[in-house]
């Protein structure tokens, strides 16, 4: 990128500066912080204390490229935020469907908006649904409407979306492994409104891969991979506007993984998933264009920015080189940023607003497509109305007041940013190679390797915090004696009673013959699915049977029950 | 040398926030305790495991709510099985009000944000007879 004269000058200046720097460090003697002598990123990558042109001279300019051009390091599209802001996608969901709807309406009134004025709703299901149960199950007590909405059937969908035009909005269904039941119920409800699946926009998480690093009960990894590939296959044929899969990098970071592990694992799983899709007969360009990523934005400001730029580059080059992807959309990393929850503290909770603002600012500078900013009270409870609104305001201040939206990829060309982006690409590719040599993501999950890697990273972080090497304001420095916060959000105790009553009423009122027949078909489809290999899977049979059952008012617990019985279900560390 | 303290740590199956409890499990093992880690759907599963494994301490980690009914059933179940002397502890995201309620019903301590694995280890050494002379001493332990 530079001519010889510039490079020679760069090196000479760097050497002079380094000598000067060392002289200053020596003055501090033993008092010099470790980070001044051997600086590193939060992932542990070694960095320098200043960067020069020769630090980026080895990088092909083509690898950096232009916004909207392969390998998309600088962004998916030529236009970043000049014509359209990123979408506001705060996570919403608690209590009864009506409670969640009230929060959706409140945030919409406060200016929460998707692309070109469209409504985006990022909705999370409750703990009972995540477990694949119904609210009358003995284990549901205390979990109903907690951390998500109590939605278990087509009729609950009707309570949630009453009066809304489904064709004019985008709905993300944040499920864990109840992906197919929730989607089936949404499709069945939409049909009642005269809207076909082909006209629905939104997202299924398709998150089976997260059982490698998230400790909730799950389907066995090989069944999860088939379920993920089957949904992609079904949507390719029936739901062209639906985003089929979300790569849950955020969960890696929350579990204690590093930035390198986060993007490395997403790429490793991407390779595994595209292979599975190919085995089912889909080409890369049929499978890939509807993938999305949920990526954490955590504390190391520049590393987190470069992480996103690096992910865009390694994803595009891998999908093009390994799978022959040609459609630019197949190579795009479309990112939903989730500002890190694990970085937030229960102590001095208002300080979290400062942290989330920095996270959101970094995400905006790196060119994210959508954003959830954590509320400042999330370490304490489900966000209050006030906290949820302030979290939205963080996005709005950055969008409207800072003018960073005028220029695409504004940090490009910084010697540090380009050098670190390149370094992270290499580190992530090495991490992927370590997984590939074990036989791929599923093999590395089965052996426990992925979990051990993440736990090692989590432990390293905790030990550094304990030793004061990693500072957390209010926790291991600048502590105060503070009174416990009064304003803790609690879900109304009535929610449990009402949810159970509604379920009982549904079971009584539905056409039991139609329901029984549909559930029998679904059970058979689930058994066939469980027994099939990915090559001879009938991709649509299971999902079509689920939709038929959802039309007959099948509940999440009933559908998941049939899937668990045939496919297996256990704590992930038992696989 | 006395037998090592036996600790059962349990996490609800639905609760993805297991980073903390798995770290605590490791630190307790490092401290010389025998630690059994399980996920549970129903509190009765914790009671069954506590009986089978003959543990002296049961710890429940909860970071997604729903802890009050779990402890309620757990305390009743332990009592029914004659395990009243088991030291019961909790951790995770448990609001201050609930912490008071739980302590009043017999939970020895709640280790929430700002506490350390060493705090929990110290409490166990204090409460479980004979454990203070257990294996590898831990810095900061009583």
Image: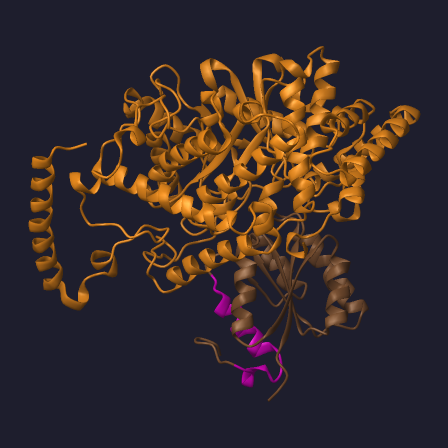
Chain colours: A orange, B brown
* Residue drawn 52% across the image and 23% down it: A289
Q: Is residue A72 left or right of residue A454?
A: left
Check the image and name the residue furthest to the right: A513
Query: Magenta segment, principal secondary structure?
Result: helix
Dividing the picture into quarters, in which one does residue B124 lie? bottom right
- Report x, y in % for residue A366: 35, 32
Q: Is residue A214 visible?
A: no
Nearest the eye: A173 or A113: A173
A507 left or right, relative to A4: right
Is residue B131 on the magenta stretch? yes
User: Residue A144: x and y, percent?
Assistant: 70, 41
Q: A437 or A198: nearer the eye?
A: A437
Q: How many marks?
A: 0
- The residue at the point 12 percent across, 39 percent down is A7
Image: magenta residue range? B115-135
At 69% from the left and 36% from the top, the residue drawn is: A534
Which residue corresponds to the image point at 35% horizontal and 17% vertical from the top-left? A79
The image shows residue A548, relative to residue A423, as above or below, that is above
Q: Can you say whether A68 is above or below A496 in the image?
A: above
| Side (left or right) of A452 relative to A23 | right
Q: Is residue A124 visible?
A: yes
Quadrant holding the N terminus of chain A: top left
Which quarter of the rendered picture does the C terminus of chain A lie within? bottom right
- Residue B122, compared with residue A157, is above or below; it is below
Specify the farthest residue to the top: A194
Q: Nearer the viewer, residue A213 or A384?
A: A213
Where residue B36 sits in the image (x, y, percent)? 65, 67
Verify whether residue A250 appears in magenta.
no
Across and down, in percent, residue B113 comes to 49, 56
State the image quarter where residue B81 is shown. Answer: bottom right
């Amino acid at each position: 990128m530079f001519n010889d004269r510039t490079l020679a000058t760069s090196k000479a200046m760097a050497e002079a500066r380094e000598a000067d720097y060392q002289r200053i460090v020596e003055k501090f003697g033993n008092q010099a912080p470790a980070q001044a002598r051997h600086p590193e990123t939060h992932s542990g990558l070694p960095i320098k204390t200043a960067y020069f042109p020769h630090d980026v001279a080895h990088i092909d300019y083509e690898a950096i490229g232009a916004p909207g051009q392969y390998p998309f390091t600088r962004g998916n599209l030529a236009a970043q935020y000049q014509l359209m802001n990123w979408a506001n996608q705060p996570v919403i969901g608690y209590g009864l469907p009506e409670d969640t709807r009230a929060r959706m309406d409140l945030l919409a009134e406060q200016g929460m908006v998707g692309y070109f004025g469209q409504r985006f709703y990022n909705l999370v299901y409750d703990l009972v649904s995540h477990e694949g149960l119904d609210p009358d199950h003995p284990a549901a007590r205390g979990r109903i409407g907690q951390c998500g909405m109590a939605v278990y059937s087509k009729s609950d969908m009707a309570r949630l979306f009453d009066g809304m035009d489904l064709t004019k909005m985008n709905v993300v269904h944040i499920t864990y492994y109840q992906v197919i039941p929730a989607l089936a119920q949404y499709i069945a409800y939409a049909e009642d409104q005269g809207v076909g699946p082909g006209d629905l926009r939104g997202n299924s998480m398709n998150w089976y891969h997260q059982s490698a690093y998230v400790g909730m009960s799950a389907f066995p990894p090989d069944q999860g991979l088939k379920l993920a590939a089957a949904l992609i296959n079904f949507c390719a044929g029936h739901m062209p506007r639906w985003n089929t899969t979300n790569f849950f990098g955020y969960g890696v970071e929350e579990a204690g993984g590093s930035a390198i592990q986060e993007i490395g694992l997403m790429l490793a799983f991407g390779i595994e998933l595209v292979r599975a899709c190919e085995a089912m007969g889909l080409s890369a360009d049929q499978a890939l264009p509807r993938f999305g990523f949920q990526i954490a934005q955590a504390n190391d400001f520049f590393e987190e920015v470069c992480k996103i730029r690096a992910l865009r580059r390694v994803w595009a080059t891998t999908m093009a080189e390994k799978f022959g992807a040609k459609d630019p959309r197949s190579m795009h990393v479309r990112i939903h940023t989730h500002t890190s929850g694990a970085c937030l503290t229960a102590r001095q909770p208002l300080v979290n607003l400062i942290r989330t603002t920095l996270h959101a600012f970094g995400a905006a500078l790196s060119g994210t497509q959508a954003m959830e900013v954590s509320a400042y009270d999330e370490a304490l409870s489900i966000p209050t109305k006030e906290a949820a609104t302030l979290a939205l305001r963080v996005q709005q201040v950055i969008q409207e007041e800072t003018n960073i939206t005028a220029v695409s990829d504004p940090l490009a060309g910084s010697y540090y940013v380009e050098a670190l982006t390149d370094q992270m690409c290499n580190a992530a590719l090495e991490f992927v190679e370590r997984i590939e040599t074990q036989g791929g993501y599923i093999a590395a999950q089965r052996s426990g390797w992925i979990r051990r890697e993440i736990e090692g990273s989590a432990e390293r972080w905790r030990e550094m915090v304990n030793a004061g090497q990693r500072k957390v304001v209010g926790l291991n420095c600048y502590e105060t004696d503070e009174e416990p916060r009064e304003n803790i959000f609690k879900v109304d105790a009535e929610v449990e009673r009402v949810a159970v009553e509604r379920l009982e009423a549904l079971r009584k009122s539905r056409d039991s013959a139609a329901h029984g027949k549909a559930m029998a078909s679904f059970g058979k489809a689930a058994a066939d699915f469980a027994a099939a290999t990915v090559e001879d899977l009938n991709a649509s049979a299971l999902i079509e049977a689920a939709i038929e059952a959802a039309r007959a008012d099948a509940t999440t617990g009933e559908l998941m029950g049939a899937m668990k019985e045939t496919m297996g279900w256990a704590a992930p560390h038992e696989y | 040398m006395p037998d090592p303290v036996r600790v059962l740590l349990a996490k609800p199956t639905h609760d993805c926030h297991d980073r903390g409890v798995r770290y605590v499990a490791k630190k307790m093992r490092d401290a010389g305790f025998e630690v059994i880690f399980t996920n549970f759907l129903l509190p009765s599963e914790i009671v069954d495991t506590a009986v089978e494994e003959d543990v002296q301490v049961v710890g429940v980690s909860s970071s997604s709510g729903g802890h009050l009914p779990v402890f309620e059933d757990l305390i009743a179940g332990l009592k029914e099985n004659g395990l009243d002397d088991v030291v019961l502890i909790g951790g995770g995201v448990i609001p201050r009000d609930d912490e008071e309620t739980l302590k009043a019903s017999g939970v020895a301590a709640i280790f929430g944000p700002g506490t350390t694995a060493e705090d929990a280890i110290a409490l166990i050494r204090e409460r479980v007879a004979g454990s203070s002379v257990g294996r590898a001493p831990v810095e900061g332990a009583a």
